[in-house]
């Protein structure tokens, strides 16, 4: 005789991040060969590695500061009350097919994290006239009306007027603060907006920052729509 089934304990496990990748050229799912890591944006040393499951979804678990979240019920009440934390996700291809990429998000994230290639809709919007030429070789050693001091790195409070910015010796020099302890950015931002459709942007960097200091070159519409090169700790990142 079989004893009746009796539930003694029920345990749920919630993954704070799930990602699925597609090849932008072919539209095919990329189900392997990628390295995915996630870390609190304010604490890059605490990295968690993602793994790919049998459905081709990259899952990040045991993320720093989210262990308590992972044992939640995963129901509506859970997601309504779950505290969010800012994370940076880095993706690289161990097989050398795709460029490395990173983005910021808030975790835990319900369902699969969705992200659309930001140029996907551009081809449907026609071909506006490209931007007029906008350049500066900084040979006059003075900031002119084309520029204003500022930063395109969010939040707005990240701008710090104690960061030294000066044109000297035919170049722009930005000197970071030492051990600021908070986000502290400054630099040149174009005073006017420019149409960059079908245009190209380049910058020559003579010397980058070291350690956790960041060298950033950004093209932005606003705080939520931007492309940038970001150099930090001997790594060059392409971000959007």
Image (spheres, rainbow, N blue to C red):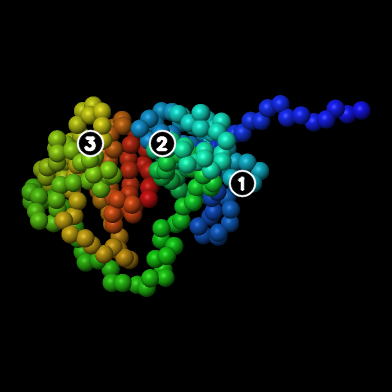
Which residue does the numbered mark 3 point to in the structure image?
184
Which residue does the numbered mark 2 point to in the structure image?
85
Q: Quadrant of residue 178?
A: top left
Q: Please indicate whether residue 147 sits to the left or right of residue 205 in the image.
A: left
Mark 1 vs 2, N-terminal side? 1
Q: Please indicate whether residue 75 sits to the left or right of residue 179 in the image.
A: right
- Residue drawn at (43%, 46%) of the image: 101
Front-most of residues 13 and 197: 13
Q: Which mark identifies residue 56?
A: 1
In space, the residues marked 1 and 2 are separated at their CA atoms by 25 Å
Front-most of residues 113 and 77: 77
Percent x, y of residue 127? 34, 72
Percent x, y of residue 225? 33, 54
Of tags 1 and 2, the one toward the viewer is 2
Cβ atoms at labels 1 and 2 below 8 Å apart = no
In what element is the residue under mark 1?
A: loop
- Residue drawn at (50%, 47%) of the image: 113
In space, the residues marked 1 and 3 are separated at their CA atoms by 39 Å
Mark 1 vs 3, N-terminal side? 1
Percent x, y of residue 6? 76, 29
Q: Residues within 10 Å of mark 2 (few under 14, many from 20)?
A: some
In space, the residues marked 2 and 3 are separated at their CA atoms by 21 Å
Of tags 2 and 3, the one toward the viewer is 2
- Residue drawn at (46%, 38%) of the image: 81
Q: Residues within 10 Å of mark 1 (few under 14, many from 20)?
A: some
Is residue 34 something that shows in the picture?
Answer: no
Q: Quadrant of residue 172?
A: top left
Cβ atoms at labels 1 and 3 below 8 Å apart = no
């Amino acid at each position: 005789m079989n004893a009746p089934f009796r539930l003694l304990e029920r345990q749920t496990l919630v993954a704070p991040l799930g990602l699925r990748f597609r090849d932008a050229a072919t539209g095919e799912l990329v189900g392997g060969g990628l390295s995915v890591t996630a870390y609190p944006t304010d604490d890059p040393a605490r990295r968690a590695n993602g793994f790919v499951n049998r459905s081709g979804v990259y899952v990040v678990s045991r993320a720093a500061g989210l262990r308590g979240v992972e044992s939640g019920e995963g129901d509506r009440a859970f997601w309504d009350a779950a505290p969010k934390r800012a994370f940076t996700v880095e993706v690289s291809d161990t097989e050398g097919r795709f460029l490395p990429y990173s983005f910021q998000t808030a975790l835990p994230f319900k369902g699969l994290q969705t992200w659309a290639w930001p140029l996907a809709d551009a081809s449907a919007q026609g071909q506006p006239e490209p931007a007029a030429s906008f350049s500066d070789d900084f040979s006059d050693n003075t900031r002119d009306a084309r520029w204003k001091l500022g930063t395109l790195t969010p939040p707005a409070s990240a701008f710090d007027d104690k960061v030294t910015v000066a044109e000297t010796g035919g170049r722009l020099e930005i000197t970071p603060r030492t051990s600021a302890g908070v986000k502290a950015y400054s630099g040149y931002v174009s005073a006017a907006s420019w149409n960059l459709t079908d245009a190209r942007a380049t910058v020559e960097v003579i010397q980058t920052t070291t350690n956790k200091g960041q060298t950033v070159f950004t093209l932005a519409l606003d705080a939520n729509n931007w492309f940038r090169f970001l150099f930090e700790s001997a790594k060059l990142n392409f971000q959007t």
